[in-house]
Amino acid sequence: MTDAAGIARWIQDFAGSDERAKIESAMRLYLAGVSLCTPLLSRWVSDPEFRELTLPGKPAGEAHARNQPSAIVVGIAVQPETFQKIRAANNSPRLAQVPPDQDAMEFELHLNASCEFDILTTREPGGQGAISRYLEKFGEGIQQIEIYVRDVDRATEILRTRFALAPVYPATRAGADDTRVNFVLATTPDAKKVLIELVEAAR
C-alpha cells in the first residue's frame, strides 16, 4: 500500500535534478495512480460498449501527440510553488489552456514513454475551486485519474445507467485544450474514493 508520505516524496523528486530519481519516482507514482482505477476500469470494460469507447495506449516509443493520448493519465495536484518548481525542472512544458471559469492551471509531464501526468494547481489558494479544496484537505497528491474515451457523453451515460455512477456534472463540459470532460466519483473494492475524469480529446 502506498502511503501519502511516499507519494509526496515522489512528487518532490519531479522538481529535482537527479534524472534517475525522477524517472523512478515517476514510475512509482504512475503505478500508484493506475492501481487506484484498475479495479474500477476492469469492471467497466467488461461492458463491450464501454470497452470499445476506451482509447488504447500508444505503442512504446511513439512520439506524444495531442490526438493520440494514452488511455490513462494520472492527475497530480500540487501547491503553486511546487507547480512552478516542477515545470522549471522539466524544460517548462506548455501550460494547458484551461477554461477561465475553472480553478486550475496545468501542464502535461511525460517522464518516459509509459508514464503520463497532468500536473495541476489552483489559481486561487484557499478558494472554493476543486483543486484548492483538494489541497486544503489532502495536501499534494493524486487528485484524479483521467481516462480517455472516444465519446464522453456515451461513456458517462453507460456508467450512469449500467453501473449506477452519477456524473459530477449534469452535462459534459469544456476541459483543458478543447477537450470535453465529465467526472465520476467512484468507490474501489477496498472503499477508497477515486475521482475519475472521462476525457474526449479535441477533434
Image (cartoon, rainbow, N blue to C red):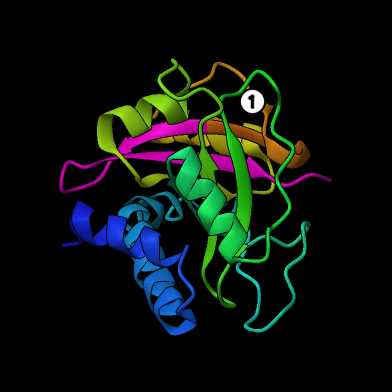
In the foreground, 199 or 3? 3
18 with respect to 156 (left or right): left
Q: Position of residue 46 (x, y in %)?
A: 42, 55
Q: Quadrant of residue 69?
A: bottom right
Q: Position of residue 161 (x, y in %)?
A: 45, 28
Residue at position x 29%, y 61% from top? 9
Asked if residue 164 can be seen in this view, the reply is no
Element type at mark 1: loop
| Rendered position, 162 above or below 15 | above
Circle 1: residue type: Thr
In the foreground, 92 or 65? 92
Residue at position x 41%, y 65% from top? 30
Q: Position of residue 42 (x, y in %)?
A: 37, 58
Q: Quadrant of the N terminus?
A: bottom left
| Rendered position, 59 above or below 73 | below
77 with respect to 1 (left or right): right
- Is residue 19 a member of the stretch shown in magenta? no
In the foreground, 13 or 180? 13
**In this figure, which residue is indicated by the disc labeled 1?**
172
The residue segment tinted magenta is 183-203
| Rendered position, 116 above or below 162 | below
Residue at position x 42%, y 27% from top? 132
Residue at position x 15%, y 48% from top? 190
